[in-house]
Amino acid sequence: MTAGTTGALAQTGGDQTGDATPEEDWREITPALTAYIAGGASHEVPAAIRERGRLHVLDTLASIIACHSLEAAQLGRKYAAAMSPGGESPILGSRQTASPIDAVFASAMTAHAAEINDFIPSAYVQPGPAIVPTALETARQHKRSGKEFVGAVIAGYEIAGRLPKAIGTRNLYYAGLANHGIAPTFGAAAAAAAMMRLTPNEVDHMLAYCAQQASGSWQWLLDVRHIEKAFVFGGMGARNGLQAAMMAQLGFTGVPASFDNENGWFRWRAFQGEGKDHASLVEGLHERYEMSLAAMKRYPVGGPTQPAVRALLDLRQTVRPEAVERIVVAMPGEAATFERANMPALNIPYLAAIIMLDGRLDFVDAQSLSRQENDEAARGFAQKVTVVRDEAQEMGEGEDRTESARVTVSLKDGSQQERYIAYVPGFPTHPLAKPEVEEKARELVEPVLGKAKANRLIGLCDELDDAQSVDAVVDLMRFEAT
């Protein structure tokens, strides 16, 4: 203990932190939370929610296959190989192996190596990259059935989606903590705990170690190469969550009932501002499902940019790039972020340029930092594009979050063409239907593995609830990385 630490403790009365706040009407959370997580693999879940769970598994695995050759995926595997060269757990999207923790880290990095995986818009969380690989590896290790695996995934999404809203998404932002790093840690841990059959008491200790590892900075917004972002959104949560579950299984103890302790992480002063609803972490379990609030991206770009992309693709059918004088994209929220984004898949001027120049949106080019920086034609066209905030499109407090965009193209002959996209299918308010999810999966998987294996993956995911193990899914995800 340093002198500075001693002084700080003295000012707060020794053992008292001085930074937590009691609530007279506090509702005990721990018993319901730990029991739910411990039983995650065997809960009775409505058939429609189970189907969405299987579809989100498919969407995540298709993302891993499509992204296996991208830089973040390659670096994830390189790290895993360096850390545990003798490990035997499979790294998805490759034939490499590593320790369980390093393997799920690399698989999760791959799942979010591009902007194509799922998200929960109300929680500002992208759950699939961390949760699905972690649940799949622990199901493989512990020889669980496909039905148990799907149950664990649903439980993981439930915790990942509820946690940021219980704390208050604005409180997390003001505390400098990214929902995208914190929630997947708890979600991956919950999925792993269900597969490992931890007891409620072990889950209690696991949660304490999740809290100690709850991290992630909003500086991911400044990332250029989508590597730090893949770490925060995917790799870190998978690694930390599985690690916390394994520590609890091995007998590590932490602060008991840490989610109820008034000096614990969950009740810290930074989390007591407007929007907190701590009891919502356990209220309505088995009645309301975060899986029904999870969204899928139809296009390989960030969620808020999807409507603009849809509008631009529609307009490109009748507009030639050489005829364009100017394009204005009006959207809700922080429009400037998407006008100046460093990452190609979030930069609307760049996306507008390649859509207009190419007449389509290619998965590789949507992620291509090299093209964004070096394609002079694209750089020149992007200067014609302005992104502005339109408050009229913004949702009211408490309304279901969606995304929209109004794109106006001014042509050199003085005329204009406009498209307003109220939503892109994939948001919870307008979810992708099962055939649409499967179509997206084929688009992602066929260029890598071919039509037969794309159809095989779709079939395996559809039949998970009847599968005796997840081995066939794991085997299909094992192929030579390029």
Image: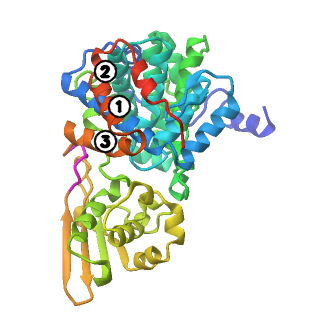
In the picture, the quarter occupied by the C terminus is top right
Callout 2–callout 1 Cβ contact below 8 Å: yes
Q: Residues within 10 Å of mark 2 (few under 14, many from 20)?
A: many
Which residue is denoted by mark 3 in the rendering? 442
Tell me which residue sits at (60%, 32%) in the image.
17
Looking at the rendering, the stretch of residues picked out in magenta corresponds to: 423-429
Give the residue type at disc 3: Arg
Residue 464 - label: 2
Callout 3–callout 2 Cβ contact below 8 Å: no
Give left or right: position of 393 versus 84: left
How far across and how far down the image is residue 147, in percent? 32, 16
**Residue placed farthest to the bottom in the image?**
413
Q: Earlier in the sequence, mark 2 or mark 1?
A: 1
Q: Residues within 10 Å of mark 3 (few under 14, many from 20)?
A: many
Task: Quote the CA–CA distance across marks 2 and 1.
Answer: 10 Å
Residue 391 in view (yes/no): no
